[in-house]
Image: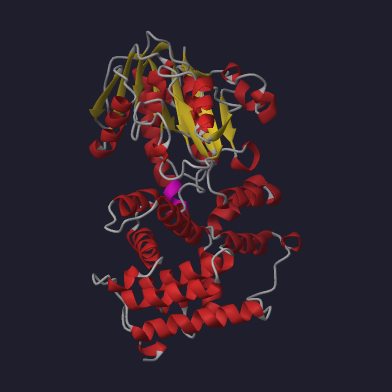
Amino acid sequence: MSENSEPKPALKKNDSHLRKRGVSSRKIAVEVLIKVQEKGAYTNIALANALDGSKYDLSERDRAFITALVQGVLRNKNNLDKAIGAVASKPIDKIQPPLLNLLRIAFFQIESMPDIPHSAVVDTAVELARVIGHVGLSKFVNGILRTHIRNIEKGRLIAEPVDMSKLEGAELAAALAERHSMPLWLVSRWLKRFGAEETEKLLKASDVPAKLTVRVNDIAMETEGYQRLLLDKGVVAERSMLVPTCLVITERKSLKGPIEKLPGYEDGIFSVQDEAAAFVGQVMAPQTSDVVIDLCAAPGGKTVNIGELMNNKGRIIAIDKHEKRLNMVKENRLRLGLTNIETYTADGTTYEHPPVDKVLVDAPCSGTGVINKRSDIRLKLKEEDIAEVNVIQKALLTNAAKLVKPGGALIYSTCSIEREENEDMIEWFLNDESGADFDRDDISACFINDSLSKLGLEEEAAQGYALFLPSRHDFSGFFVARLKRK
């Protein structure tokens, strides 16, 4: 059957072909990519559901391989599609999603996984094409891949490398967007704000998988003790320069697979949390006698961190309007043995309560600081989304102001690096009637040792906020500010 007579392929229930080693892993990766690209699923959730719910007997190596394929394709989608388009006889948008994602996976392996022989990539891709379609599709896939491999062997380039130093304006934005598979509008925005050099660093940082960082529950165990325990198990971890209870894992040796495999997880000794996100607890600096409200608590990383900092004393009121997500807070609370956290399903923009000591607004945002963790942001985020989320952020801040007692603190944070969601939002709040009783509160003392000077954030901290950029600070992009009620 010719390529032009290709019918719409569908993933079949007959899995006899999947007995061949590696085909089942690639099939799962294709299914996850379709859910992310076609149905708008979050990458991390779609991956977790696919891996945990798989009917195949997946080894830890299989799980890591599937994750690498999915994230790799999403991070390199533009370049992969360009390479496919160079050898396919039909436009990319005319190739059905299952077949297109199969090709993207195969091209990604050829381009970025040199340890896998090209012949093995072709064989498994051809076998999988039979599973999702028919013999005609397998011949189509075989032809495309072998043509691409021949072009590589003959040194034929899809396009000459672009010298970014010679480009500027719209041409530079377009070239960077294509190279890093990022939305053109976002690259243009970053160029305008940060300049060419910083923008290219931000884009490169967005392409690098996030480091695995754990925050030790020092109620259960001292951080140094857990670091030694990990080392005894062959896991090398470095102390964070920003948060004393955070450990950045640099080598895992024998302990591969899900984070739950690390010693102490079930015993509540640690949680997974990026350093910048964990820094929010230091900015809040809760006391053991405080009453705290977390207006956007789910999934609960910051909530339980606050509970640990309060030494399981005081009172934390965790609010979220999504009951299913709030269940994650409950699960984490139980695993860590924290009894000072109460959970309530409610809307943080309208929730009422007598004024308390401290309120946290970890606001919904564009997520542009964590694109290396959530590759689906590249596909789904639109420029108008920032204006829409600004409305929610303002409503949350307006309501939060009513919940802070005189002398209390309001902490605002996002995992965005966009000015409208961060610095401009604080400026708006202080100039709005709702924030008339609030002032910026210097957070310089929240930085341990000499981390403030090393990070170059002295001026910002004195103004009551910190903006972490992954291009400069070696952890996720994040914003946090503290405001004090007069």
Assign the N terminus to one quadrant of the image: bottom left
Q: How many marks?
A: 0
- Looking at the image, residue 90 lies above or below residue 15: below
Q: Main secondary structure of the magenta part?
A: helix
Q: Is residue 412 left or right of residue 10?
A: right
Could you tell whether 46 is left or right of 416 in the image? left
Q: Residue furthest top?
A: 289
Q: How is the protein colored in the picture?
A: secondary structure
Image coordinates of residue 205 in percent, x first then y, are 60, 48
Q: 404 or 430: which is nearer to us?
A: 404
Across and down, in percent, residue 385 comes to 42, 49
Left-right relation of 458 to 146: right
Measuring from the top left, give residue 382's x and y in whole percent: 45, 54
* Residue for point 44% across, 80% down: 141
Residue that appears at 33% across and 69% down:
18
Classify residue 56 as left or right of residue 443: left
Q: Is residue 416 visible?
A: yes
Instruction: Give the image quarter of residue 301.
Output: top left
Q: Is residue 283 above or below residue 377?
A: above
What range of the chain is rendered magenta? 381-386
- Residue 237 or residue 243, whichever sits in front: 237
Q: In the rendered view, would you say 167 is above or below 197?
A: below
The residue lying furthest to the right in this view is: 166
Towards the viewer: 410 or 485: 410
Instruction: Please check the rendered image and state whether residue 385 is part of the magenta-colored stretch, yes or no.
Output: yes
User: What residue is shown at x 63% (from left), y 43% (from top)?
Assistant: 471
Residue 472 covered by magenta stretch: no
Residue 283 visible here: no
Residue at figure coordinates x 56%, y 32% from the top left: 237
